[in-house]
């Protein structure tokens, strides 16, 4: 049968489209499609952004209600409620507000670890970093303990939490115990017994931006990284990372990720996000208005244990859009997944893109639906290859924590 030129052109076009789609799917690390959203609804809008973790086919969502109580709800992989909301904190240790989500992570044997900032006597901003754990899948939680070992009343908060490959628990936070005007200190503590006790606190830096949340991640061979926004002379506020190669026993001097030179007399309230792939490469994303004064989100990486970072790459953001609150995770094959907010004076939506070294960024896609406010996204890659994207979403009279999954 003779093939006409027209049929040949159509065949070539279809073949090219198939190759393009295959290339795109390879960049995504899967088929690139997210399932329909599911999640939980709150009775009103007086709730913090969600924190999400996943383990063994279960999804854990933690959040803070305005009255100061910390909760966790357990869902199945398809969104069915397995355990209704459980109160995490003791009556004597409420959270100090809904401006940030709790810290949440899962241990190597399914232990659930939760942190929050709790007010204490001694001053308007006096607080402790509280920690609790569950060993029965989120049904019950232990009495909380203070992570900070300094009993002098001072401001503390913006904590982050992670677990090491050997089960060690790591917590980082901002601490005002030095009482230096205009700045906080970045502190770190670890626990080798599942949070029953914590080692002596380690001071990582004395000039941290006091209201930008810390970030922490861990990898193989004892690698631990802590990050915060550092304050330099002239109110320059750039991102810094301190690395440890011995499970957090000692840390190297902090390294600046990028010389953005963002000068601002105030706290941006915007922290970084980072994760490590199986090769030990540290990927890092952050928000800044440095250099050109425009709101921007960047991606960088370190291949030498946090000693140096690659030149920053700007995320593919649309024109006349205000990008915000980036988060990332890294899949086993080295694919980096990123989520962020894109805002206009009217709309706020959640965006997603992937990145592979040598291939660059995929075309961004919108994950949120509807016209109501979507905010504070997060993303994580499960051990089974499932990617979880989550965010807060406001209805007219109540709010939701929404999740979309990709396999």
Image (cartoon, helix red, strand yellow):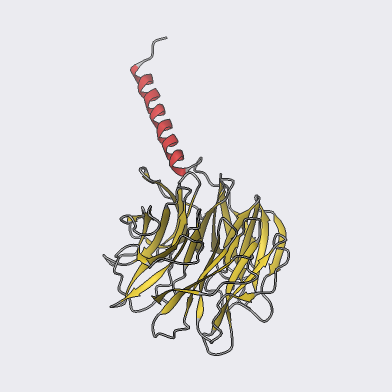
| Picture residue at 40% right of the left edge, 66% below the top | 252
Furthest-bottom residue in this view = 122
Q: Is residue 41 visible?
A: no
Residue 139 placement (x, y as % from top left) = 73, 63
User: Tag count in the figure?
Assistant: 0
Image height of 330 relative to 182, above or below: above
Q: Is residue 6 left or right of residue 213?
A: left
Viewer-nearest residue: 61 or 203:
203
Residue 89 placement (x, y as % from top left) = 66, 74
Looking at the rendering, in which quadrant would you find the C terminus?
top right
Residue 168 placement (x, y as % from top left) = 58, 62
| Picture residue at 56% right of the left edge, 70% below the top | 48
| Picture residue at 47% right of the left edge, 65% below the top | 215
Residue 267 placement (x, y as % from top left) = 39, 76
Furthest-left residue in this view = 292
Q: Is residue 380 visible?
A: yes
Which corner quadrant of the image does residue 169 belong to?
A: bottom right
Image height of 148 relative to 33, above or below: below
Image height of 128 relative to 286, above or below: below
Which corner quadrant of the image does residue 261 belong to?
A: bottom left
| Picture residue at 69% right of the left edge, 65% below the top | 85
Image height of 393 relative to 186, above or below: above
Looking at the rendering, in which quadrant would you find the N terminus?
top left
Viewer-nearest residue: 363 or 186:
186
């Amino acid at each position: 049968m003779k093939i006409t030129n027209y049929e040949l052109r159509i065949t070539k076009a279809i073949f090219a489209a198939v190759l393009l789609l295959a290339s795109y799917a390879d960049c995504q690390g899967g088929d690139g499609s997210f399932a329909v959203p599911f999640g939980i609804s709150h009775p009103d809008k007086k709730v913090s952004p969600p924190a999400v973790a996943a383990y063994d086919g279960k999804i854990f969502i933690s959040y803070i209600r305005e009255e100061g109580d910390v909760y966790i709800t357990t869902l199945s992989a398809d969104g069915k409620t397995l355990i209704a909301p459980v109160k995490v904190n003791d009556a004597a240790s409420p959270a100090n507000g809904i401006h940030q989500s709790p810290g949440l992570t899962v241990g190597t044997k399914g232990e659930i670890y939760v942190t929050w900032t709790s007010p204490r006597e001694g001053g308007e901003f006096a607080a402790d970093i509280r920690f609790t754990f569950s060993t029965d899948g989120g049904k019950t939680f232990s009495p909380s303990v203070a992570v900070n070992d300094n009993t002098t009343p001072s401001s503390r908060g913006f904590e982050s939490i992670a677990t090491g490959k050997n089960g060690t628990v790591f917590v980082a936070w901002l601490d005002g115990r030095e009482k230096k005007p205009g700045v906080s200190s970045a502190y770190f503590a670890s626990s080798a017994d599942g949070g029953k006790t914590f080692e002596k606190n380690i001071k990582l830096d004395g000039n941290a931006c006091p209201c930008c949340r810390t970030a922490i991640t861990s990898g193989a061979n004892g690698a631990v990284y802590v990050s915060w926004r550092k304050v330099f002379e002239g109110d320059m506020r750039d991102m810094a990372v301190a690395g440890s190669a011995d499970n957090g026993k000692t840390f190297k001097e902090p390294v600046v990720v990028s010389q953005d030179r963002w000068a601002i007399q105030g706290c941006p309230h915007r922290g970084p996000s980072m994760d490590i792939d199986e090769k030990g490469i540290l990927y890092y994303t952050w928000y800044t208005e440095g250099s050109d004064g425009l709101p921007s989100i960047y991606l960088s990486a370190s291949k030498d244990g946090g000693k140096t970072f690659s030149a920053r790459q700007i995320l593919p953001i649309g024109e006349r859009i205000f990008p915000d609150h980036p988060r990332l995770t890294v899949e086993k094959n080295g694919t980096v997944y990123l989520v962020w907010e894109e805002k206009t004076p009217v709309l706020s939506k959640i965006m997603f893109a992937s990145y592979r070294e040598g291939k660059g960024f995929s075309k961004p896609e919108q994950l949120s639906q509807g016209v109501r406010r979507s905010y504070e996204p997060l993303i994580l890659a499960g051990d089974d290859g499932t990617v979880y994207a989550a965010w807060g979403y406001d209805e007219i009279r109540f709010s939701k924590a929404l999740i979309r999954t990709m396999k």
